[in-house]
Amino acid sequence: MPGAPEPYDERLTVPRMWWVLAIGIGVAMALILFPFGPLPILAGLVGGSALAMMGVSSYGSARIRVVAGSLMAGKARIPLEALGEAVVLDPAETVAWRSHKADPRAFMLMRSYVPTALKVEIIDPTDPTPYVYLSTRSPQRLADALAAVRTAAR
């Protein structure tokens, strides 16, 4: 459909090095079980690696999407009518807003390995959440997608 806003969909995948570390956890489990023989060593290697990789995969499966009049961030679904101004945060501001400037009432989808973020004000008077903080690799594109969907809805 011409003129329809471009949808936004981003998965906050973990860095490749984390997968290597997950295998390292399996190796550590194998070494712990070394005194018990070859079968426990193999079980420790496979089991430890599998559990660590499941944890890494779960942590890296967070998604940010703008669909059907909503901002979906992780498990949160926020209607676009509840969102106010979006502020693109550079790396220095990103660190500040996830540390000393952070409000404990805010919804935060943080990933420390993502250097930039978007802060979106919540304007719903019934919601005590002051803003949404979203780690994103392309904050300007997300802000543009939110603005485009809001404009198209009018």
Image (spheres, helix red, strand yellow):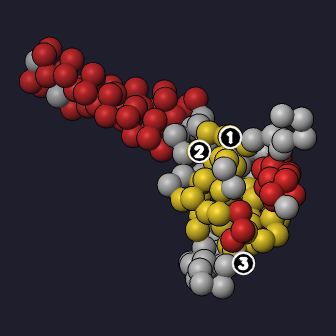
Residue 40 lies in what quarter of the image? top left
In this orientation, does residue 41 appear? Answer: yes
In the drawing, what numbered circle is on residue 123? 3
Q: Which residue is mark 1?
A: 9
State how far apart marks 3 and 2 are (Cα). 23 Å
Q: Count the marks: how many?
A: 3
What secondary structure is marked by label 2? strand
Tell whether 62 sits left or right of 95: left
Which quadrant does the C terminus fall into?
bottom right
State how far apart marks 2 and 1 are (Cα). 7 Å
The kind of residue on which mark 2 rests is Arg
Location of residue 105 in the rendering, given as x and y in whole percent from the top left corner: 57, 78
**First in residue order: circle 3 vs circle 1:** 1
In the drawing, what numbered circle is on residue 63? 2
**First in residue order: circle 2 vs circle 1:** 1
Location of residue 135 in the rendering, given as x and y in whole percent from the top left corner: 67, 53
Name the residue: 60% across, 84% down.
126
Labels 2 and 1 touching (C-beta < 8 A): yes
The kind of residue on which mark 1 rests is Asp
In this orientation, does residue 92 appear? Answer: no
Residue 12 lies in what quarter of the image? top right
Q: Residue furthest right?
A: 3
Q: Residues within 10 Å of mark 3 (few under 14, many from 20)?
A: some
Location of residue 38 in the rendering, given as x and y in whole percent from the top left corner: 14, 14
Name the residue: 38% across, 34% down.
54
132 up-or-down from 44: above or below: below
